[in-house]
Image (spheres, rainbow, N blue to C red):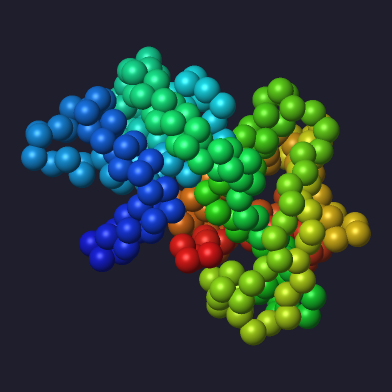
């Protein structure tokens, strides 16, 4: 469990990243009070939930997608019984979507923000660092999450491509391998496979392609979402005991100052 100081720092980071939208989403949740914990004096009660909802909102394109995100997060925080059905979150979604639209109108450039995605490998790395490594900010995580979800559900077809930023020493500090020689991919692609449990990595011309079946796409989507919750230091690998070292995809949280 995080201590109070870590929680406080995380909320400061969220306020810095999302500014007025963070306060507005927390206010809307408190006002609507979907799980009935508003006692009028505890106005910060929903800030933790706002913190996990916000990184997923930038990729939403309408009220229904916002409602789905908010409901999913409340189920994760409180369980399905307490969170209730998705219909409970309709009014919340409408107000949050209005807040997002207002922010986009005031800062049009934010609508085209693709975020920062880092994908790298250590050519001469130790065995414990073999394979590929991935982290991203909230905007890039949302774009990846939505694309993977679309591939899994069949609403998207063909490889989905994402630009990759050059890895920095601050990024490398997360896996505590700051001084190792690292090489970035210039693009990440995600493609589908018919076999549900298929998972493979292939690099060509500095483009890393993740090919995954439906079950592994769902796993990949959850891992990307985990980055927004400061989860990491674990890897996806192909099934089976015998696999090449370069077939591991490691996930890492992202330092807030990047």
Q: Percent x, y for residue 175?
A: 57, 72
- Visible residue check, residue 7: yes
Above or below 131: residue 102: above
The mark tally for this picture is 0
Seen in the image, is 248 located left or right of residue 47? right
Position of residue 64 measured from the top left corner of the image (x, y, whole percent): 49, 20
| 4 left or right, relative to 252 | left
Can you say whether 53 is above or below 119 in the image? above
Identify the residue at image location x=43%, y=41%.
54
Q: Who's the residue at 71% across and 66% down the image? A: 166
Quadrant of res 131: bottom right
Q: Nearer the viewer, residue 84 or 185?
A: 185
Q: In the picture shown, does residue 89 fall above or below 126?
A: above
Q: Position of residue 108 (x, y in %)?
A: 56, 38
Residue 77 seen in this snapshot: no
- Quadrant for the N terminus, please: bottom left
Give the percent coordinates (x, y) of residue 67. 44, 24
Please name whichever residue, 90 or 252, is drawn nearer the observer in this view of the structure: 90
Q: Residue at x 34, y 36 (%)?
A: 25
From the viewer's perspective, is 135 left or right of 7? right
The outermost residue toward the front is 106
Q: Is 172 on the left or on the right of 6, as rendered? A: right
Find the residue positioned furthest to the bottom: 179
């Amino acid at each position: 469990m995080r201590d109070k100081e870590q929680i406080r720092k995380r909320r400061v980071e969220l306020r810095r990243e999302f500014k007025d939208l963070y306060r507005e989403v927390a206010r809307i949740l408190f006002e609507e009070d979907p799980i009935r914990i508003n006692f009028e004096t505890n106005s910060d009660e929903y800030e933790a939930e706002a913190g996990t909802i916000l990184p997923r909102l930038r990729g939403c394109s309408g009220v229904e997608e916002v409602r789905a995100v908010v409901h999913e997060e409340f189920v994760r925080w409180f369980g399905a019984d307490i969170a209730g059905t998705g219909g409970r979150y309709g009014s919340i979604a409408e107000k949050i979507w209005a807040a997002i639209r207002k922010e986009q109108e005031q800062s049009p450039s934010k609508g085209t923000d693709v975020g920062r995605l880092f994908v790298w490998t250590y050519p001469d790395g130790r065995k414990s660092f073999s394979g590929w490594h991935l982290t991203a900010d909230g905007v890039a995580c949302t774009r990846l999450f939505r694309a993977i979800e679309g591939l899994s559900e069949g609403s998207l077809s063909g490889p989905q491509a994402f630009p990759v930023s050059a890895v920095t020493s601050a990024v490398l500090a997360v896996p505590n391998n700051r001084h190792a020689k690292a090489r970035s991919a210039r693009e990440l692609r995600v493609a589908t496979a018919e076999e549900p449990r298929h998972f493979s990595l292939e690099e060509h011309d500095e483009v890393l392609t993740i090919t995954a079946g439906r079950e592994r796409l769902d796993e990949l989507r959850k891992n990307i979402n985990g980055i927004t919750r400061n989860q990491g230091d674990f890897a996806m690998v192909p099934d089976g005991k015998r696999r090449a070292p370069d077939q591991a995809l490691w996930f890492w949280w992202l330092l807030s100052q990047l």
